[in-house]
Amino acid sequence: MEFRLLGTVSVETLTGSLPLGPAKRRSLLAALLLSANTPVSLGRLTECLWDDEPPSQARGVIQGHVSRLRALLAGADAEAYGVELATLGDAYVLRAPETLLDSQRFEELLMLAREQRGPADAVLMFKEALSLWQGPALSGAFAGPPLRVAAHSLEESRLATVEQLSRAYGALGEHHRAAALLTAETAAHPLRESLAAELMLALFRAGRQSEALDRFHRTRRLLADELGIDPGHELADAYALILRGAPGSTDAPPKSAEASAAAVPPGSGGPPGAEGPSCGGGSPGGTEGPSGGGGPSRVAGGGADAAAPAPPRPPFPAAPPSPAGEPHPVDLLPRAPRGFHGRAAELAALSRSAAGEAPVCLVTGPAGVGKTALALQWAHRNPALFPDGRLFADLRGFSAAGEPALIDVLREFLLALGVSPRRVPESVPAAAALFRSLTARRRLLVVLDNARDSATVRTLLPGGADCVTLVTSRHRLEGLIASDAARPVPLDTLETDDGTALLAGVLGEERVLAEPVAARRLSELCGGLPLALRVTAARLAGRPHWTLATLAGELADERGRLAYLDVDDTGVAAALRLTVQQLPPGAVHQLARLGHHPGGHYDPYAAAALAGTDPVTARAALEQLAAAHLVTETAPGRWVLHDLVRLYARSLDPASAREALTGVLDHCIATALAAADTAEPGGEPCFVLPEDFRRPSAVQDFADRAEAMRWLATEREDLALTALAAREAGLDDRAWRIILLQWPQMVWRVRDSWSPLLELALESARAEKDAYAESRVLTLLGWVLTEEGRTAEAAALLERSPVLAREAGDPLGEATALVNLAVVQAELGELPTALENCARAVELTRGEGDRHTEMLTLQHLARMHLTAHRPQEALDCARTALDLGPEHEEAARRSLLLAVCGEAQLALGDEEDGVRLLDRAAREAERDGYDEGAVRALEALLRVSSRTEFRRRHDEALRRLAEES
């Protein structure tokens, strides 16, 4: 996704421009983008959308445009890019990473260009910046006064950049290029004296003195005729400088004048107007360089030949358009690798291997050789071959994080193919059979990355003859070749020429061609391993004054340089060691601690907890590591370490392993506590913190329940790995807490295979001999087992839970345990015992004064009274519960209690009041998006009424449930 202001206001996606509609909607978008990540008031937006007196319904018009923009962005999966259009009181804010906005990237490139020491590098930066312009700024929008000012300021910045580019050309002696550039601009802006002055000097230095003098006189006459003024000092100084030169001479002017006219001072702020405008009064001021091959890392070391620069890379890869009205095929592929070089023979071999019936293509090779990059490159090059989509799973067969459970991989595949979460089988054989059945008539690509053994792959093979499976592994997987006729495509290290091409892709052709022998030597010393080549090139790109021969000399001294084929990480470690030596101490410290993280991903909060710093310091260190190609940012604010880099990082400070682990465990506890509190603000706390708990320097805030639940869902795998690491390290007091704090997600997705994780928590609680912890875990595990249909197992566990809670002095825990036990007992036909346990739970919560938990116990007691044909008691319990909670109490609970009231009234013979209460329960559930509650209430209504409206609403709620699942 990319937002464009430098031309027609637009939002570009992989499938084309979003249909923004009328000019005023574009104006609204432009106003928000010009103040990206800053709230823009309704009044300011009104000024941007109307020239004169706004209409009386201006607020409604703006709200309508905002609503439509939100829908368009949501349809383009804006959330995946970190984009959100939010309402803040009487203002709106468009939150987006600055790298998605062309005006921000323009300003960043200008800043980088001014910092370059050599004019050749500055030329490339300026040209890259100007290539972002697709026409006049803010085109296609209705320009109210603030937008006109912003567009003018952007255009001033562009013109100032043109002038700076011409001066850089001049510093290189390429005066003809400067003259050609400026001639076009002066034609469009004939009254801009600074442009005319630059053009005069460029023409003079190119040996075209008469044209330079003619330009002066034409501009002088135009200024007099149009504005009634004489030339300013810039024009006059340029004219005087030219007159001092010998007639027809191409010699340079006097040194002082030459320096004044042609130099591009590092860090120069440029002329007025060079700063980006902001409709909200601020300056965009981007901080991120552009992505891809056209970014700063490519040109910092000298760039391509200035006489024939490579064309700028398009902002998005081409994607075939989807037929109108048809859904997009499923696509789980990560993005295509950047800077991919060579491998033509292997790509062709993959294409040949993919031909035939149900082919299994097997890419094998040593660690770090680029197996995943090759697989993704081939997959992205051939989208038309797979009209039904592309699936991807990292099997982590060689990762310290451990392999994912096969059922988890199959679940992701089945969900992607449209299977409802409730219909995903719980066993691996059943899920694999369903996957084969669903893919039998489809044309899919399945990429299984980092497979460790043949058995794992066989389970995940699709069933269709037209499906292609692409497997990568460090092992040869000869068993898969024997059983499934897998077609191997062995991947070796890069040839020397391809290795130097990779270096040139980062450093620029000019720098590599200047030292061809040293470039080939570097490729050889890196063993042709892409990771080692990229790290080495990154060091050179950041140091334009270094020669390739200097670095080659350093690499030649490293021990074990050619032993990487025998030991996976030897070659990489040598290259990494050289890189790390150049990092600031804070970045080295951060890298060393990252190696001890048991999970796969990091955000600044986790990184800070590992390193014992704060998120701001951690983010800065992560940015430094990313610049050195030591970590990779997979999403805004989310980084990963390559497996080999992780291994190297872990060796930097092995003694800090336990301290780092404890820090990240306590970070997980603190953040999960915040998430649980935001997701279920009325919920009773699960536990007290460990005695030696170290609170992180900062804990992530969650704006609302949706954000908290997203965090719990996104971090589920890493939280599980962290809890497992805590258990293995003997930190059981942390392990069960990290697992138990995920209870809001467990409640929301109860059938999502939580049992193994809760069993790990139970082991930890028992290892600690902590009755409180064991009771709490048993209560939650018993409920999960009940929902999974494992009632007998649940009953056996839950019998113990209330007893443990009493031993621990935890009355609220005992109450919850009794309720869960009662639910199981009711299902097993032990209704009198279930009623007694629920009644006891109500007494316990009242004794503690916890209204939230009391409502929960009364809700279950009321439902059990109904089951026992005691409608009056059910009605009394439900009404008491409703009186305890405010109107904004959890929607699900209110709906369920109202439904109990309605069913009780029906049982008492009051049909009118029963129908009214059930209808209210359904409407409240519908209003709050609780479709399960709506279905339950409407089903009860349909048992006593045949009204068409109830049937329609029931069917609509069922449809929504099916779509959500």
Image (tube, helix red, strand yellow):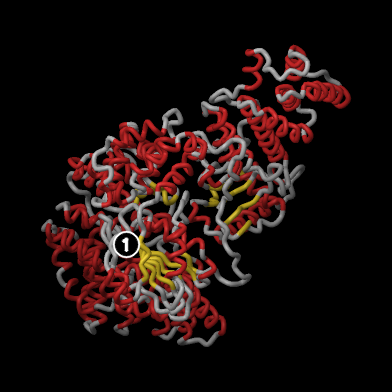
Answer yes or no: is residue 46 visible. Answer: no
In the image, 728 versus 299, the foreground residue is 299
Residue 3 horizontal/vertical position (percent): 59, 49
Residue 659 horizontal/vertical position (percent): 20, 42
**Quadrant housing the C terminus:** bottom left
Going 42% across and 51% down the picture, which residue do you hit? Answer: 634
Is residue 190 rendered to the left or right of residue 119? right
In the image, 635 versus 902, the foreground residue is 635
Identify whether 254 is placed above or below 343.
above
Going 15% across and 58% down the picture, which residue do you hit? Answer: 809
Amino acid type of disc 1? Ser
Q: Using the rendered view, name the quadrant where residue 162 is placed.
A: top right
In the image, 143 versus 170, the foreground residue is 170
**Which residue in the rendered view is the most extreme toward the right?**
225
Q: Which residue is mark 1?
A: 473
Identify whether 244 is placed above or below 662.
above
Residue 892 horizontal/vertical position (percent): 41, 68
Is residue 343 rendered to the left or right of residue 694? right
Q: Using the rendered view, name the quadrant where residue 758 is placed.
A: bottom left
Is residue 634 rendered to the left or right of residue 395? right
In the image, 265 versus 413, the foreground residue is 265
Is residue 585 rendered to the left or right of residue 269? left
Secondary structure beneath disc 1? strand
Answer yes or no: is residue 404 visible. Answer: yes
Going 25% across and 66% down the picture, which residue do you hit? Answer: 780
Q: Residues within 10 Å of mark 1 (few under 14, many from 20)?
A: many
Residue 541 horizontal/vertical position (percent): 44, 36
The image shows a total of numbered marks equal to 1
